[in-house]
Amino acid sequence: MRDRRSFLKDMLARTYNLNSNRRVLGKTGEEINLVSLGGEITVANLDKQEEAVKIINRAIDLGVNYIDTAPAYKDGDSESNIGKVMKNRREEVFLASKTHKRSYSETMELIESSLNRLQTDYLDLYQVHNIRTEQDLLEIFSENGAIKALEELKDQDVIRNIGITGHKDPEILLKGIKEYDFDTALISMNAADIHYKSFQEALLEELIERDMGIIGMKVLGRGKLVSENGLDSIREALYYVWSLPLTTTIIGIGSLEELEENVELARKFEILSVDEMLEIEAKIEEFEEKGNFFKYDW
């Protein structure tokens, strides 16, 4: 494996070829804002639906054009809240959801409920959710697995693109990506990633080679990365990830103020240098479990 400095130099050179605030989502051809709206935190809270709807509408007003959700987020409450906005603004966003089911029949049932909650008749992206093990791969690729359902739905124009997601083991995702021609990959990507089971080093080059849309998640480690024993600021955490050659980052939002801050950071974003990237990685090394907690615990 190349040394770290050489790897980063190559990755940053690739990022310089991308648009700074909007990047093409691989073979989908869609231009997506660096900041995308995650379907958790306030957006998934049915008891805060009024606030969630304000956040979703404001995100779209600010140019956020990718919204990510899943039926597993609060038993569909996230999709229900997003559906309140999609009813009137569906054509303004690239809408993504997921199936956590592994079989054909269960996935077909699941997407019907997702579409109903989201108040739409199609999804721009439908993903196999949280692929963690060899058994997950065996099941989704089986004769009556989830991939068969996704291919059928794509043929029917119910979904437009097929993706894979995972945050536990990059080697498992790598096997899935090599076995099937996915359009996108949603992967964990933050400043702590390099220190344990690195998705960055295991997957980025392969995803780029396959022209897949690369979507980062867990970029703030659910807030754990920015703390007394972590990074200095959200800016530092986000600029680190945005300096890598991915398309966008989905971020869970707790308030309108958080949303405004993230969008403003993206507007002012400039790619970090190799030295700045290495400095951030070194800063978090001692506390890497905080940023990689989902690899250990989930």
Image (cartoon, helix red, strand yellow):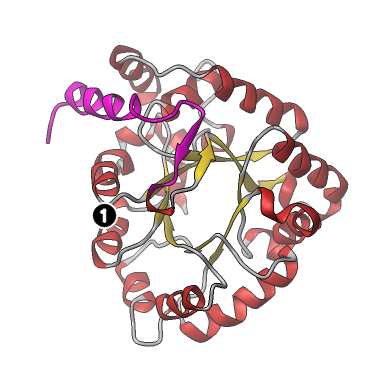
- Asked if one can make out residue 254 in the rendered structure from this viewpoint, the answer is no
Q: Residue at x 63, y 38 (%)?
A: 64
Circle 1 sits on which residue? 171
> In the rendering, at what x and y percent does residue 81 appear?
77, 55
Horizontal side, residue 54 vs residue 67: left or right: right
Point out the image quarter for the N terminus: top left
> In the rendering, at what x and y percent does residue 298 appear?
47, 54
Mark 1 element type: helix
> In the rendering, at what x and y percent does residue 8 appear?
25, 25
Q: Residue at x 44, y 29 (%)?
A: 19
Tell me the magenta residue range. Answer: 1-26
Between 281 and 286, the one nearer to me in the picture: 281
Quadrant position of residue 7:
top left
Horizontal side, residue 16 vs residue 52: left or right: left
Figure check: 103 above or below 120: below
Between 129 and 231, the one nearer to me in the picture: 129
Between 266 and 290, the one nearer to me in the picture: 266
Q: Residue at x 34, y 24 (%)?
A: 16
| Mark 1 neighbour density, 10 Å: few (under 14) some (14–19) many (20 or more) | some
Figure check: 226 above or below 206: above
Horizontal side, residue 33 vs residue 284: left or right: right
> In the rendering, at what x and y percent does residue 218 appear?
50, 41
Was residue 166 drawn as part of the magenta stretch in this picture?
no
Amino acid type, label 1: Glu
